[in-house]
Image (spheres, helix red, strand yellow):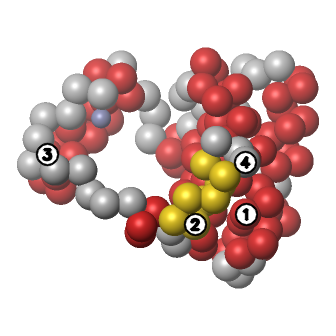
Amino acid sequence: MKQKLSRHAALKFQYKFDCICEACCDNWPTYLSLRPGKIPSVLRYRSSDLIGPETIERLQKGDKMFAYKQFKPLCELAEDLEPYAPCKELADCQEALKQCLAILEGTVPYGYSQVVEWKAIPPKV
Ligand SMILES: [Zn+2]
């Protein structure tokens, strides 16, 4: 309960709204207290392969080609891990995706076959 109150208070302070997302309402653990999920072994294998130390290291170095290559498999892994949320594997996968997007900065594979220049898309009014 204390975790839920502090999460709500932190979000309220930072973003000025009362969050009613699934994680807040169901009091999901925050990242540092997340544990490995009870996921099928095939997903565990893909997770350790895709979001292992080498991936983190290369993304932290800003390897653009690596980020481009990993983006699609990471998206697919995130979708496959979603039913097992909350779990550390999904959080790590989402973090790797965030790093990919930061590295690609406007250029991401869209629909897995087409490159979209985000900056070229006019903002929705
Ligand atoms: Zn929330």
Does the residue at mark 3 contact the one at mark 1 (Cβ under 8 Å)? no
Nearer mark to the viewer, of 2 and 3: 2
Residue sitting at x 89%, y 24%: 41
Q: Residue at x 9, y 48 (%)?
A: 16
Depicted 95 relative to depicted 111: above or below: below
Residue occupying the point 66% across, 52% down: 114
Q: Residue 30's x, y, as percent? A: 44, 41
Instruction: Say which label, 4 or 3, has the lower sequence index.
Output: 3
Q: Which corner quadrant of the image does residue 104 belong to?
A: bottom right
> Which of pointers 2 and 1 lies earlier in the amino acid sequence?
1
Q: CA distance from mark 2 to mark 1?
A: 9 Å
Residue 60 x %, y %: 67, 75
State the image coordinates of residue 19 (x, y, percent, origin top left).
20, 33
Please report whichever mark, 2 or 4, sits nearer to the chain's N-terminal start. 2
Q: Position of residue 6 (x, y in %)?
A: 24, 41
For residue 107, the mark is 2
Q: Amino acid at mark 3?
A: Lys
Where does label 4 land, which residue?
113
Residue under label 1, please give it.
Answer: 68
Q: Amino acid at mark 4?
A: Ser
CA separation, marks 3 and 1? 35 Å
Q: Residue at x 29, y 22 (%)?
A: 25
Mark carried by residue 12: 3
Secondary element under disc 3, as helix, strand or loop, is helix
> Which element type, helix, strand or loop, lies under badge 4?
loop
Distance from mark 2 CB to nearest ligand 1 atom below 8 Å? no
What type is the residue that disc 2 sits on?
Answer: Thr
Quadrant (top left/top right/bottom left/bottom right) for the N terminus? top left
Q: How many marks?
A: 4
Q: Is residue 106 visible?
A: yes
